[in-house]
Amino acid sequence: MGDWASFLVPVFLGLLVLAAVCRHVPVFELFSEGAKEGLHACVSLLPVLTGLLLAISMLQASGALELAASWVQPFASLVGLPAETVPLALLKPVSGSGSTALLAQLLESEGPDSFSGRVASVLAGSTETAFYCIAVYFGAVREKGNAGILLAALAGHLVSCLCAGLVIRLFF
């Protein structure tokens, strides 16, 4: 892509604003109202996100993640998940940034073309930060009773973990 690609978003936004002004839409007032609603949503999410980040920090600092990984590792090896990827599989539903840091460490120590590196890359790309997403989305709308959604998200995560080693063995 050339230098023209860096102008696509500003040009598109400019055309959008121009079209709204031509239709006599109060652009700035609507923008201000939307920004205010977004700010209120952010403020309402702060307690949920603070608790989630505190829990993640405590998991990592206390060594609970490594302990849980040592318990899960025998079962993971039965389905072909390398021991090095178990902490990533456990942390990914809770923390995107923490799991990205673990992925970077694993890729640096094992190499991106190693079996562990490839499985970790599949895990990082095929799983979601379920607890974070559910906390943010349901915290924003103040919805209760999301246990079924959490179970479905964790079931999807489990399937991704179970298939990661198999998929890498099939394709590489």
Image (cartoon, rainbow, N blue to C red):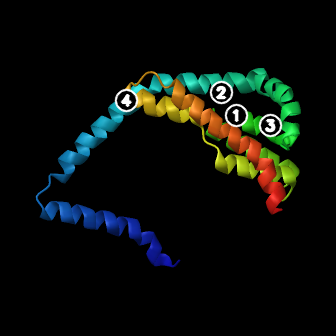
The residue that disc 3 covers is: 86
User: Does the CB distance between marks 4 and 3 fall below 8 Å?
Assistant: no
Q: Distance between the residues labelled 4 and 3?
A: 33 Å
- The mark that comes first in sequence, 2 or 4, is 2
Q: Distance between the residues labelled 3 and 2?
A: 16 Å
Tell me the residue at 59%/27% (across/down). Answer: 53
- The mark that comes first in sequence, 1 or 2, is 2
The residue that disc 2 covers is: 56
The residue that disc 1 covers is: 91
Secondary structure of residue under mark 1: helix
User: Does the CB distance between marks 3 and 2 fall below 8 Å?
Assistant: no
- The mark that comes first in sequence, 4 or 1, is 1
Q: Is residue 64 above or below residue 134?
A: above
Secondary structure of residue under mark 4: helix
- The mark that comes first in sequence, 1 or 3, is 3
Give, as a three-letter code, the residue at label 2. Ile
Compared across the picture, whether 131 is left or right of 24 comes to right
User: Does the CB distance between marks 1 and 2 fall below 8 Å?
Assistant: yes
Q: Where is residue 104 in the image (x, y as percent from the top left)?
A: 75, 48
Badge 4: residue crowd in 10 Å (few <14, some 14–19, many ≥20): few
- The mark that comes first in sequence, 4 or 3, is 3
Q: In the rendered image, is residue 93 in sight?
A: no
Give, as a three-letter code, the residue at label 1. Leu
Compared across the picture, whether 54 is left or right of 108 comes to left
Q: In the rendered image, is residue 89 in sight?
A: yes
Disc ID at residue 141: 4
Which mark lies nearer to you, 3 or 2? 3
Q: In this view, does 24 lie above or below 128?
A: below
Compared across the picture, whether 4 is left or right of 167 comes to left
- The mark that comes first in sequence, 3 or 2, is 2
Q: How far apart are marks 1 and 3 (CA)?
A: 9 Å
